[in-house]
């Protein structure tokens, strides 16, 4: 865990000045053990923020795979429609196409939301980084480490406040994506229900695939 955190700190510091104000590592190395313990909470918050970014990235990959499968499902259903030789088979094939197309539209809307959420979580990670640095400067000044008196805690506090305000604003801006995803999901659920009704029920129908 510590190795991952150190790597993340290095990557964040290399990304540019946005919320990237840091306490020199040489100064932190001089902290007494009991003071370093006080950094654990901020370090755990940083690790949690890393996990959320990883999960958001994984969700994008899962959605991409699901979109690919839904497209293949739609093509297969189109082939079934061409081969259908009675009205019932034709209706089931058409309902399967409709469900697959609605599924793709839903997954695309979900993917838009996933990408927006990843942006927010990446920014939240920078906030966790900023809070971690605030904890470090607080610890350094508390331990009266040489040079820490030149670091202004208010600047680090301002960095955290500015970043958290930006995250709050970005989360509030997710409303349109969330609404789009909800509408598309409801449309897909309706198509799925119609297909399930025609092929017995949603739990046992071989035509209905849940995400």
Image: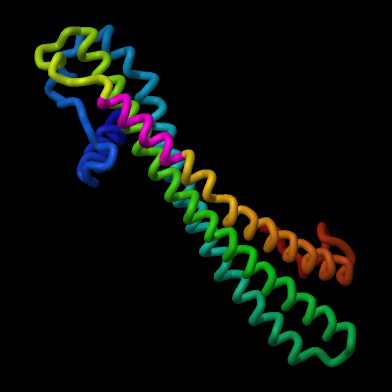
Residue 18: horizontal and vertical position, in percent? Answer: 27, 42
Residue drawn at x 78%, y 68% is: 191
Quadrant the C terminus occupies:
bottom right
In this rendering, the answer to whether 4 lies above or below 149 is below
**Residue 184, x across and y down, in percent:** 68, 63
Q: Is residue 86 visible?
A: yes
Residue 90 is situated, as x and y percent measured from the top left of the image, at 83, 86
- In the depicted structure, whether residue 87 falls above or below residue 196: below
Q: Residue at x 88, y 90 (%)?
A: 86
Q: Main secondary structure of the magenta part?
A: helix
Q: Identify the image quadrant of residue 11.
A: top left
Q: Which residue shows up at 30% across the image and 28% down it?
A: 2
Identify which residue, 54 or 174, lies in the foreground.
Answer: 174
- Asked which quadrant contains residue 9, the reply is top left
Assign the N terminus to one quadrant of the image.
top left
Instruction: Judge whether 101 appears above or below 14 on screen.
Output: below
Q: Is residue 171 left or right of residue 32?
A: right
Residue 152 position (above or below residue 125):
above
Is residue 158 in the magenta section? yes
Relative horizontal placement of residue 186, taking residue 92 as reference (left or right): left
Magenta part of the protein: which range? 155-167
Between 141 and 68, the one lying in front of the other is 141
Residue 1 is at least partly visible in this image = no
Q: Is residue 183 magenta?
A: no
Quadrant in the rendering for residue 145: top left
């Amino acid at each position: 865990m510590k190795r991952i955190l150190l790597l993340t700190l290095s990557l964040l510091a290399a990304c540019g000045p946005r919320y990237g104000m840091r306490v020199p590592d040489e100064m932190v190395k001089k902290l007494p053990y009991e003071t370093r313990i006080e950094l654990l909470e901020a370090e755990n918050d940083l690790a949690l923020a890393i996990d959320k970014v990883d999960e958001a990235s994984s969700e994008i990959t899962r959605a991409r795979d699901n979109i690919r499968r839904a497209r293949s499902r739609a093509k297969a259903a189109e082939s079934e429609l061409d081969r259908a030789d009675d009205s019932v088979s034709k209706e089931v094939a058409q309902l399967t196409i409709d469900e697959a197309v609605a599924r793709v539209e839903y997954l695309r809307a979900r993917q838009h939301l996933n990408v927006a959420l990843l942006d927010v979580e990446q920014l939240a990670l920078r906030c966790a980084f900023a809070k971690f640095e605030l904890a470090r400067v607080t610890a350094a000044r508390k331990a009266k480490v040489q040079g820490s008196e030149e670091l202004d805690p208010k600047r680090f506090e301002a960095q955290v406040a500015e970043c958290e305000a930006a995250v709050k604003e970005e989360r509030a801006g997710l409303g349109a994506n969330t609404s789009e995803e909800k509408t598309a999901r409801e449309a897909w659920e309706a198509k799925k229900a119609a297909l399930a009704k025609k092929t017995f029920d949603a739990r046992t129908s071989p035509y209905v695939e849940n995400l």
